[in-house]
Amino acid sequence: MTCLLLLTLFVFISPIYTVFTYNATDDMALLFETTGCDSQCRFNASEFSLDTIDLWPGNCSTVCAVLKFTSSSNNIPYEKLKSTFQNLNSLRGVLRIENTTLTNFSFFGNITLISNINKNVLSISNNPKLTDISVLFTITNIYINYPVQIMNNPKLDVFPLCVGENFLDFDRFYIVNNMKDCGCTGSIINNANIFAYKNCTSIFGPTEISNATDASMFSALSDVRNITGPISIKNTNFQNLSFFSKMERMKGDDSIVNLDIHSNPNMTRLGFESLMDLYNIEDWFRVNIQDVHPDFCLTMEEMQVFTTFNTKYVKLEAKYCNITTRKDGQKTCVFESMSALANDCVHIMGNVVVSSGDEHHTGKLSKVIRIYGSLSITNTTLKNLEFLGNLINVAVLNDTSPAILLDSNPDLFDISLLSMRFPYTSGPNAVVVQNNAPNIFPNPYQCHNYQNAVGAYVFYNRAECDWVLSDGDYTEIDTGGSSQFSEKKAHQNCGVFAILICALLSFVNI
Ligand SMILES: *[C@@H]1O[C@H](CO)[C@@H](O)[C@H](O)[C@H]1NC(C)=O
Ligand SMILES: *[C@@H]1O[C@H](CO)[C@@H](O)[C@H](O)[C@H]1NC(C)=O
Ligand SMILES: *[C@@H]1O[C@H](CO)[C@@H](O)[C@H](O)[C@H]1NC(C)=O
Ligand SMILES: *[C@@H]1O[C@H](CO)[C@@H](O)[C@H](O)[C@H]1NC(C)=O
Ligand SMILES: *[C@@H]1O[C@H](CO)[C@@H](O)[C@H](O)[C@H]1NC(C)=O
Ligand SMILES: *[C@@H]1O[C@H](CO)[C@@H](O)[C@H](O)[C@H]1NC(C)=O
Ligand SMILES: *[C@@H]1O[C@H](CO)[C@@H](O)[C@H](O)[C@H]1NC(C)=O
Ligand SMILES: *[C@@H]1O[C@H](CO)[C@@H](O)[C@H](O)[C@H]1NC(C)=O
Ligand SMILES: *[C@@H]1O[C@H](CO)[C@@H](O)[C@H](O)[C@H]1NC(C)=O
Ligand SMILES: *[C@@H]1O[C@H](CO)[C@@H](O)[C@H](O)[C@H]1NC(C)=O
Ligand SMILES: *[C@@H]1O[C@H](CO)[C@@H](O)[C@H](O)[C@H]1NC(C)=O
Ligand SMILES: *[C@@H]1O[C@H](CO)[C@@H](O)[C@H](O)[C@H]1NC(C)=O
């Protein structure tokens, strides 16, 4: 029985990532070109052995090296290793430990930093005695998300690396055949191999669910909590993905689509009941929902996750589900009119219309944090939007109208929305401001600041920010285009400033 199981595993599970390959010659050549590497503090050999050990610049605390241990490193005495590396604090380059009989890396007693500037593959492979790589759990990585390959180390528990802080900003893991891996390795999952995923709590690596016809079998995935790497679900007859109802976190990869759901003609619901965190290390988390059932809908909680993390879409062919209660019990109102609206709504479903005569009802919106639908404020005598101070998001589905429309309010001069982040519409303009008090934005800079604050592009008096009318003329200013915002900053760099950049970027990408 075990044999059969093993056999079937070998037959059906073939990861989409293959082993990360590297060319050591090229990596060495690149190292020699790397600026800032002091040639006196560079390890010039491609392998570390008794023949090359004397080339190690033992007096340097920072050494540039593609430091590779192989079977020819096996006969170096431990004390010799220890004295050789005692001054090494910082490795500019990468570590490769392959085919050795090492049991641990404790001879790297003082290393605290890896600066893998060329993002070379880190490889720890085929080391039958290796039990302890804890030095990797404590080092700081200056360059993040380089490929990490750890395989065929039968005595090694790699799990702490996958959930630890030091590799938090990594998702390119190929970690298989160790005593304990990070989780299950993604592959093309279908009716024939789904049983092998029975006990998975996390999946690493690109994953595809396709050509699957028996949704009940996919309850095998119902323990999955974390997915690291892109996932696509296509060509199924699934009605929903409720087998992922315990999934909490998805971590994306690069600039590709991270959650790709298409060609599932019977799918009407997502069913991600527990999802709370979407993250992509160096780019936006991208979603595609396309060619699903015409009734396909998202719950307000699902959309709330998408807007919180400012997800980008290829297609989002969805409407809101007609569900007006929330798991967290917060009060949800269905909008009919401002006069009929309750006083204590926290969420509103529907298109909120504030128009002439509604001015004295606006206090009813003061507790509202999210609107699932659009917000339009037109023909009022309002002067500011203070009553929307708690409003975090407005997201329009199945409609191309602006998420926020402020039109024909002659006294409206202060349009600050203090809590607003990432209003969404599938149409071209998330925020449209026109025909209000003059000079809401006296110049393009103030318009840009507003865009940055709310995290969406603003269409102001029928023009983009760069064309804001000032002193009676249209002036185009050179803001340097958008090319300066070419890459989303990683979490740890994402202070206020980066969030502003992220906000602008949201429209640059996709
Ligand atoms: C590595 O790259 C060099 C030059 O770029 C090439 O000559 C060599 O054949 C490559 N080695 C392998 C194993 O692909
Ligand atoms: C490495 O080689 C370069 C020349 O290619 C030489 O200048 C440098 O001194 C060497 N570094 C060490 C530590 O031997
Ligand atoms: C390293 O430093 C020691 C003491 O400062 C010195 O004696 C030795 O020559 C140095 N070695 C190299 C290779 O520079
Ligand atoms: C390690 O061993 C494997 C299999 O024996 C071999 O294919 C590979 O080339 C070896 N790698 C190194 C770096 O020696
Ligand atoms: C770390 O550095 C200190 C001082 O330079 C040295 O005494 C000690 O032996 C080093 N530790 C290891 C494990 O190399
Ligand atoms: C799942 O876990 C159960 C109980 O530990 C075990 O019997 C079964 O073989 C596991 N299935 C797989 C596919 O690992
Ligand atoms: C899921 O990810 C979180 C955060 O990284 C981690 O704390 C948790 O242990 C992971 N769960 C599993 C089952 O891997
Ligand atoms: C889909 O599955 C069926 C039966 O399970 C198989 O005959 C067919 O070749 C598969 N199609 C693709 C594209 O994999
Ligand atoms: C989709 O659902 C309909 C009715 O529920 C069913 O007749 C049809 O076979 C399903 N399509 C697929 C591809 O399973
Ligand atoms: C939404 O559901 C309610 C009852 O739950 C029903 O009265 C209403 O007609 C539904 N609306 C739509 C648009 O289906
Ligand atoms: C404002 O009111 C006028 C007259 O009542 C109406 O014609 C116009 O369409 C309204 N504008 C907006 C934007 O609602
Ligand atoms: C709204 O949904 C309907 C039915 O699914 C679809 O035909 C229509 O194209 C959608 N409209 C937009 C703007 O997405």
Image (cartoon, rainbow, N blue to C red):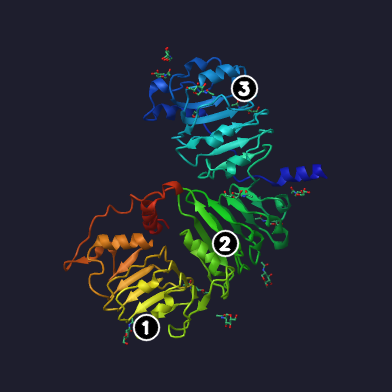
- In the rendered image, residue 94, in percent from the top left (x then y), is placed at 50, 31
Q: Is residue 251 above or below residue 145?
A: below
Which image quadrant for residue 408?
Answer: bottom left
Circle 2: residue type: His
Name which of mark 1 and mark 2 comes first in the sequence.
Answer: 2
**Residue 71 - label:** 3
Of the residues tagged 3 and 1, which is closer to the observer?
1
Question: How far apart are the alpha carbons under marks 3 and 1?
Answer: 80 Å
> Which of the pair 153/236 is nearer the observer?
153
Name which of mark 3 and mark 1 comes first in the sequence.
Answer: 3
User: In the figure, is residue 367 to the left or right of 158?
Assistant: left
> Which of the pair 15/501 is nearer the observer?
501
Mark 2 lies on a secondary structure that is strand
What residue is drawn where x is 32% and y is 81%?
A: 380
Label 3 Cα crowd, 10 Å radius (few <14 / some 14-19 / many 20+): some
**Residue 95 - label:** none
In the picture of the structure, the residue carrying the numbered disc 2 is 262
Of the residues tagged 1 and 2, which is closer to the observer?
1
Question: Is label 1's Cβ within 8 Å of ligand 11?
Answer: no
Q: Does the rendering let one see residue 165? A: yes
> Which of the pair 144/483 is nearer the observer?
144
Circle 1: residue type: His
